[in-house]
Every structure is written in C-alpha cells, then in structure tokens.
Amino acid sequence: MSILNVLLSGPGLIGRKHADLLANSPRCALKVIVAPRTARNMTFAQERGVALVETIDAALDRFPIDAAILASPNAFHCEQALMCLDRRIPTLVEKPLATNSREALVICEASERNSTPVLVGHHRTYSGLLPVAKKFICSPSFGQPVAVHGSALFYKPDDYFNDGPWRARIGGGPILINMIHEVGILQYLYGPICSVWAQASNERRGFEVEDTVIIGFKFENGALGTFILSDIAASNQSWEMTSGENPAYPYFDDANCYHFAGTLGSLDFPTFNVRTYSGNQTPSWWKKFDTHKLSALKTDPFEQQLHHFEDVVLGLDVPLMPASAGLSNIRVVESINISIKENKSVDVCR
C-alpha cells in the first residue's frame, strides 16, 4: 500500500497533535507544513524533516499531496479549504469549519461540486464514551428526552493567548473554539437544536471576545437544555478534566460535565452513573431509583479520527462528521452570538 502524503496547515496546539499522530501512522506521512516563516515554525518543520511553505497554493504546486489537515486559525479555514477542494484533495478541517455559516456553506458546496470529501474535526465524536451514552439515551430505560445540563468551565492561562493572539479577537473566543465542541455533542446525543437563548460577559479578561457564557437550548424533540461556559473559571467541570482522554489535563474521575434526564431514567456523564425506575414501577419522586454504572472503553479520539480520515481518503468510508454537520453546528453557534447581541431567543436556521 502506498503512503498518503499529507499537508498540514497550522502547526499550533492542535496542529502539533496532528503531526504527532501522522508520525506514528503506517498509512500516511507528513509531507509539508503551511505556516508563516517564524523561528518557532521553522524549527518545528526542521525537527519533523519537512518543508515549511507559507501558502497552500505554493505547497500544492511543489509537492504531490493526497490529503490535507487544516489546523490554522479559524479565519483561514474557508480560503484554505477551497484551495484544497478545487484540486480535489480530501480535507480535514479543524472545528469550527468556518467563522460563519456563509463560509461554511461555501465549503459544503465546493465539497459537493468537486466530489471531494471534507471531514470536520469534531474529534470528540470518535470518543469511546459517546456511543455508550447514546445507546442508553436511546434505550427504553431512559424514556423520552426531557432535559440536559452541561458545563465547560476551565482556566486558560495567559500563554494560551500570547501564543495565539487571534484567540482574543473576533473569530476566536470560547464560543467558537470550545462551545462548537459541545454543540456537536449535544446534537449527536439529543438531536437537532431548534432555538437558543444566551448571555455573555467579557468582564474578567476584557478581550474583544467573551470569557463567560450561559446558554439555553430547545431541541426539535421538545427537550430543553442549559449550558455554562467559561475560560477563566477555576473549575474541573469540563470534558477535558472529566473524560480522562488527554493526559495533558488533570483528571477528575468523580466529576461530570453533563447530566441527561429522561422520563424514566437519567445519566451522569462521563462517570456513567445511571438512575432508572425498574420494571413496571410508576415513576415518582417518592420512589427509589435502581442505580448502576455503565462501562466504556477510553480511546484517543484524535487517533481514531485520523484512522477514519485515512479510510475516507482511500475511499473506504464516508465522513462521520461531514461539512454539512460542521455547517449545522456553526448555525447553532451563530444563533448563540445573535442571541447575545440582541438579548432574545433565536431560532436556528436550517
């Protein structure tokens, strides 16, 4: 089997994770890095033994490329994706797919026009935890979805913003960078979100973008949800610190970042504590629950995502998270921002 030559744009925090995975893959190899010629980027390219080129077009002109991974700042996703798709190069675009739904739609159309797949980097979809949660939520033991509460509370240090100043400006911020993940999970587990209401604050950091947000959701199935997000909170109530999937973060095995409630049962995630009403028992707050704990296999979702992307490039599979899914998630996030700006409930455009 021939090795797939991969272009990587953006050797930042996530880009370097992709580079590490590519180095350990038997099916593909990093061929070229696209990024500004800073000392840091040049050193990284030299360490990886590959060329550093400043633009996608120049890289594609110089090297035979079979696939592209775009981990560049959000503002470059649309332009760079179109360059790859116009040359019919299958592309993995880090989340968010684009900074707005208009650009995301353009990417969707280019993918269809060129018959070239796009995989959106909602890597948590490949977690071994989500199928277990989805199976229970879709089971008779859970009943009909009623409500969900989620949180992503963590403290990003100053170095995070010094290394990527774009994260503190419009086009960055935790709604686009982090909440896009949560929206993907909520829609995967509970179905399409049809309306949102939100408020935000930037009082603690004073950046152009928000640092703390509260959000309400309504799902098409009638369920309601709440979410609290902050990147300046001294808290462990986040996916990163409760899932235990990334050793770079502290791990709290007794904490949760989601609680799902149905008419017959409920689920704490990711501790997987379950409460149900047994047998033909009539549900009532006066009655005790049957309780047990589900089990799940922990995997590296980034690694699983790369395996899937390789299959997509080779024509062995279709994208689990195609451009259309990325567009749907962006439309929800866009509605969140409109709600914050206009201080009202906003219907999500489909």
Image (cartoon, rainbow, N blue to C red):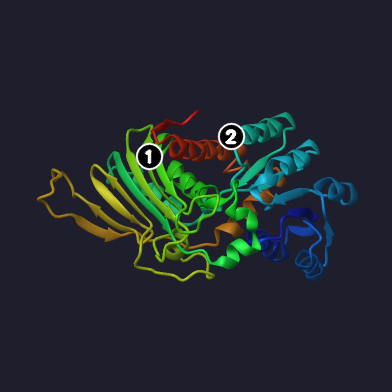
Most distant residue in the right direction: 62
Residue 217: numbered disc:
1
Of residues 167 and 127, the one drawn nearer to the viewer in this rendering: 167
Asked where in the image residue 204 lies, by quadrant, the reply is bottom left
Residue at the image position 40 percent from the left and 44 percent from the top: 199
Residue 299 shows in this picture? yes
Asked where in the image residue 346 lies, by quadrant, the reply is top left
- The quarter in which the N terminus is drawn is bottom right
Q: Which residue is mark 2?
A: 101
Of residues 34 and 162, the one drawn nearer to the viewer in this rendering: 162
Indicate the position of residue 255 as horizontal and vertical percent values.
35, 64
| Residue 183 horizontal side relative to residue 160, left or right | left
Residue 312 shows in this picture? no
| Residue 140 horizontal side relative to residue 244, left or right | left
Q: Amino acid at mark 2?
A: Ser
The residue carrying pointer 2 sits among few (fewer than 14), some (14 to 19) or many (20 or more) residues within 10 Å by Cα, namely many
Count of marks overlaid on the render: 2
Residue at the image position 59 percent from the left and 56 percent from the top: 304
Indicate the position of residue 11 as horizontal and vertical percent values.
71, 60
The residue carrying pointer 1 sits among few (fewer than 14), some (14 to 19) or many (20 or more) residues within 10 Å by Cα, namely many
Verify CB contact (< 8 Å) between mark 2 and mark 1: no
The secondary structure type at the circle numbered 2 is helix
Indicate the position of residue 2 as horizontal and vertical percent values.
81, 54
Of residues 155 and 137, the one drawn nearer to the viewer in this rendering: 155
Q: Amino acid at mark 1?
A: Phe
343 shown above or below 232? above
Upstream in sequence: badge 2 or badge 1: 2
116 shown above or below 61? above
Residue at the image position 44 percent from the left and 65 percent from the top: 241
Indicate the position of residue 174 as horizontal and vertical percent values.
51, 52
